[in-house]
Image (tube, rainbow, N blue to C red):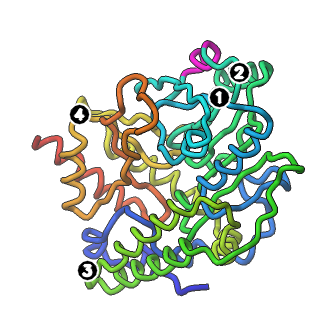
């Protein structure tokens, strides 16, 4: 295993005030590692899960299987990254868009009214679990013969989706891994025979995570890791031929203390929500709840660019939402009023207080 970054708890108060929040993962803190875990991970409810280099590769395999079954139409939410629809688009599928409401949710009644055949790509965003009404709607459309494919990327800590034919996720997006995605629910006769190969993207991202950990530890301001992360992202983007998750990532995945990581995210989401309070200038669209563990805390506001600039000046880096689609027609209003705040395991309550203070100061002065 590579050397690990120092624990957040080892930083002094002054260091914490000026430490970076957000952006790509550095190496995982040693306190989040345990001896090899033989227990199923939260999303593992069967033995048919295949671990791949990326979530987009998982979707490429799904597209191949469904096309062989004769499907040519897929229903997708209108707010979607083009990388997710690319396998379907390039193979001539009909893309039927589903509108989202102001909370970035496809309403159950929209599913029932619009989805009568083909395939549904269901993408619960930012940590939501499906409501009883949504589960009923998904069950109904499955009875109609619709194949339900669920992207679980934003809600992997919540367990497998209860109504799904096929499940996919990019675990690298929410866990400190070098690469990784999964697919579950493929028929045995069509399950690909993949070889484990050395992943170029994983190797580059591992170097980037090392470099970022070194920079954070030394405090020398080095930005070497930024170029490496960009190269890793490009390698992931062009790596469309499905290969298995790298051995290093798979080994690390089995050593992550998922309960502790989940618990830290939950505490951070609650702390940040409470610290932000209520404001007429912004709205939290996914506050933590019994059925919602946020992947990020998402704010709706009329000044996303200004807030993002302010946070960046304080070394608080929010993830970049995927750009407007070049494939879909963008049904409804494009959600350019949203910003995601990092709440992952790298941080604690002081970091959440610092982020909340920056946000409240920005809105009080603008």
- SS at circle 3: loop
- SS at circle 1: strand
Disc 1 + disc 2, Cβ < 8 Å:
yes
In the figure, residue 316 lies in which quadrant? Answer: bottom left
Q: Which numbered mark, 2 or 3, is in the foreground of this view?
A: 2
Q: Looking at the figure, which quarter contains the N terminus? A: bottom right
x and y percent of residue 366 in the render?
A: 11, 41
In the figure, residue 20 lies in which quadrant? Answer: bottom left
Indicate which disc, 2 or 3, sits on the residue closer to the N terminus.
Answer: 2
- The residue depicted at 50 percent of the width and 67 percent of the height is 235
Report the residue marked by disc 4. 302
The residues tagged by marks 1 and 2 sit, at their Cα atoms, a distance apart of 8 Å
The residues tagged by marks 4 and 2 sit, at their Cα atoms, a distance apart of 38 Å
Q: Tell me if mark 2 has few (under 14), some (14-19) or many (20+) residues whose alpha carbon lies within 10 angstroms of its own.
A: some
Indicate which disc, 1 or 3, sits on the residue closer to the N terminus.
Answer: 1
- SS at circle 4: loop
Indicate which disc, 1 or 2, sits on the residue closer to the N terminus.
Answer: 1
The residues tagged by marks 1 and 3 sit, at their Cα atoms, a distance apart of 49 Å
Report the residue marked by disc 1. 73
Indicate which disc, 3 or 4, sits on the residue closer to the N terminus.
Answer: 3
Q: Is residue 216 left or right of residue 2?
A: left
Viewer-proximal residue, 63 or 253? 63
- The residue depicted at 37 percent of the width and 77 percent of the height is 225
- The residue depicted at 52 percent of the width and 26 percent of the height is 97
Indicate which disc, 4 or 2, sits on the residue closer to the N terminus.
Answer: 2
Viewer-proximal residue, 149 or 132? 149
Q: Which residues are magenta?
A: 107-113
Report the residue marked by disc 3. 221
x and y percent of residue 124 in the render?
A: 57, 37
Report the residue marked by disc 2. 117
In this view, 281 is above or below 269: above
């Amino acid at each position: 295993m590579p050397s690990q970054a120092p624990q957040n708890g080892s930083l002094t108060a002054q260091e914490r005030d000026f430490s970076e929040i957000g952006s790509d993962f550095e190496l995982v803190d040693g306190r989040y590692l345990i001896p090899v875990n033989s227990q199923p991970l939260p999303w593992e409810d069967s033995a048919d899960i295949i671990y791949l280099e990326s979530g987009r590769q998982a979707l490429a395999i799904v597209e191949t299987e469904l096309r062989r079954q004769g499907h040519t139409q897929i229903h997708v939410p209108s707010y979607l990254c083009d990388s997710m629809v690319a396998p379907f688009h390039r193979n001539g599928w009909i893309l039927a868009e589903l509108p989202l409401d102001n909370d970035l949710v496809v309403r159950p009644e929209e599913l029932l009214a619009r989805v009568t055949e083909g395939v549904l790509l269901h993408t619960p965003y930012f940590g939501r679990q499906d409501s009883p009404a949504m589960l009923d709607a998904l069950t109904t459309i499955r009875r109609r013969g619709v194949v339900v494919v669920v992207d679980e990327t934003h809600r992997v800590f919540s367990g497998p989706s209860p109504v799904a034919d096929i499940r996919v996720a990019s675990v690298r997006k929410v866990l400190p891994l070098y690469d990784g995605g999964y697919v579950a629910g493929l028929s045995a006769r069509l399950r690909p025979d993949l070889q484990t190969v050395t992943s170029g993207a994983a190797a580059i991202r591992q170097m980037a995570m090392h470099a970022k950990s070194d920079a954070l530890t030394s405090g020398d301001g080095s930005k070497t890791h930024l170029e490496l992360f960009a190269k890793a992202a490009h390698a992931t983007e062009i790596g469309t031929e499905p290969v298995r998750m790298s051995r290093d990532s798979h080994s690390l995945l089995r050593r992550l203390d998922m309960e502790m990581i989940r618990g830290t995210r939950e505490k951070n989401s609650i702390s940040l929500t409470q610290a932000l309070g209520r404001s007429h200038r912004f709205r939290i669209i996914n506050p933590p709840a019994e059925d919602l563990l946020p992947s990020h805390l998402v704010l709706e506001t009329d000044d996303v660019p200004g807030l993002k600039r302010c946070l960046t000046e304080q070394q608080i880096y929010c993830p970049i939402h995927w750009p407007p689609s070049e494939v879909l027609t963008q049904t409804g209003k494009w959600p350019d009023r949203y910003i995601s705040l990092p709440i992952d395991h790298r941080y604690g309550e002081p970091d959440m207080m610092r982020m909340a203070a920056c946000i409240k100061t920005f809105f009080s002065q603008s």
